Image (cartoon, coloured by chain):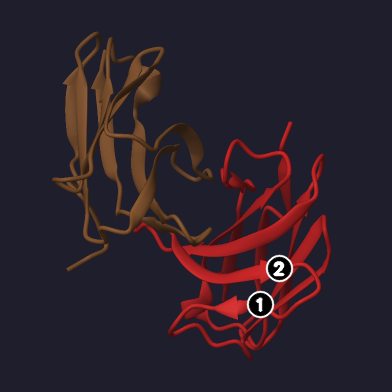
Chain colours: A red, B brown
Amino acid sequence: GAVVSQHPSRVICKSGTSVKIECRSLDFQATTMFWYRQFPKQSLMLMATSNEGSKATYEQGVEKDKFLINHASLTLSTLTVTSAHPEDSSFYICSAIGLAGRGNEQFFGPGTRLTVL
Amino acid sequence: QKEVEQNSGPLSVPEGAIASLNCTYSDRGSQSFFWYRQYSGKSPELIMFIYSNGDKEDGRFTAQLNKASQYVSLLIRDSQPSDSATYLCAVKRSNDYKLSFGAGTTVTVRA
């Protein structure tokens, strides 16, 4: 149990376009979802915390107008990278916690590889 | 000072040996400690978590926590080539769901 999916797994887009990434908890209700970004050979950096029905909380240095997060239901959160540029190319990973966890275990999605040309 | 620090490695061990990974953290309010394994191009997967001082064993993995020294380690016994990956240490405060990750230690198990 406790499966988190992400879609798409890989996306290539042109500079200036917007890209939406979906994160779904498949078999549990996710009260909180997290969005991370990972650059090559670096660790995961938390971008924002998303709670169902409320505004996301962004980490310092993350532009909320550039990275739009919507957590409209207990099973779906979306991250939209607006006006993407090559420096936004990264591995974006979501995670979720909810009623299915062992304690406060975060269940990670498989990640989305974004390449901006 | 980084919140969570790990030796970046790479750590190379022969098959069957013990791999020892270390992690230190700066926030004394940290209460939960996690070890994740991440294969190249994949997302992290949880190996172990530990909350209390001492050792916790799960199969070939042993986590050790020393809160006084702000130190947590992971031992991998009988290392296998499939253990070759980057191991991430993550720390959580008691009043927060957020995880702070270390930079990871890359382990290579030589056949």
Callout 2 secondary element: strand
Between A104 and A71, the one nearer to me in the picture: A104
Tell me residue A56's x, y (percent): 66, 77
Task: Say if A113 sits above or below B56 in the image.
Answer: below
Query: Residue at point 72% right, 39% down?
Result: A100
Choose between A39 and B101: the one closer to the eye: B101
The image quadrant of residue B72 is top left
**Is the residue at mark 1 from the same chain as the one at mark 2?**
yes
Q: Residue B63, relative to residue A26: is it above or below?
A: above
Left or right: B26 in relation to A53:
left
In the picture, measured across the screen, residue B106 lies left or right of residue A115, that is left
Q: Assess whether mark 2 and mark 1 are in contact (beta carbons under 8 angstroms).
A: yes
Instruction: Tell me the tag on residue A56.
Output: 1
Q: Give residue A72's position: percent from left, percent from top.
A: 84, 70
Q: Which mark is residue B55?
A: none
**Would you call the spot at circle 1 few (<14 residues within 10 Å), some (14-19), or many (20 or more)?**
many
Report which residue position mark 2 lands on.
Answer: A51
Q: Is residue A7 visible?
A: no
Evaluate whether residue A81 shows in this view. yes
The image quadrant where one finds the C terminus of chain A is: bottom right
Q: Where B65 falls versus A35 (above or below)?
A: above
Amino acid bearing label 1:
Ala
Residue at 50% x, 83% y is A62
Does residue A36 appear to the left or right of A95 in the view shown? Answer: left
> Which x, y percent locates residue B87?
34, 39
User: Upstream in the sequence, badge 1 or badge 2?
Assistant: 2
Q: Considering the numbered disc 1 on the image, is that residue within a helix, a strand or a loop? A: loop
How many numbered tags mark residues here?
2
Judging from the image, mark 2 belongs to the subunit labelled: A
Disc 2 crowd, CA 10 A, few/some/many (<14, 14-19, 20+): many
Alpha carbon separation for disc pair 1 and 2: 6 Å
Quadrant of image for the N terminus of chain A:
top right
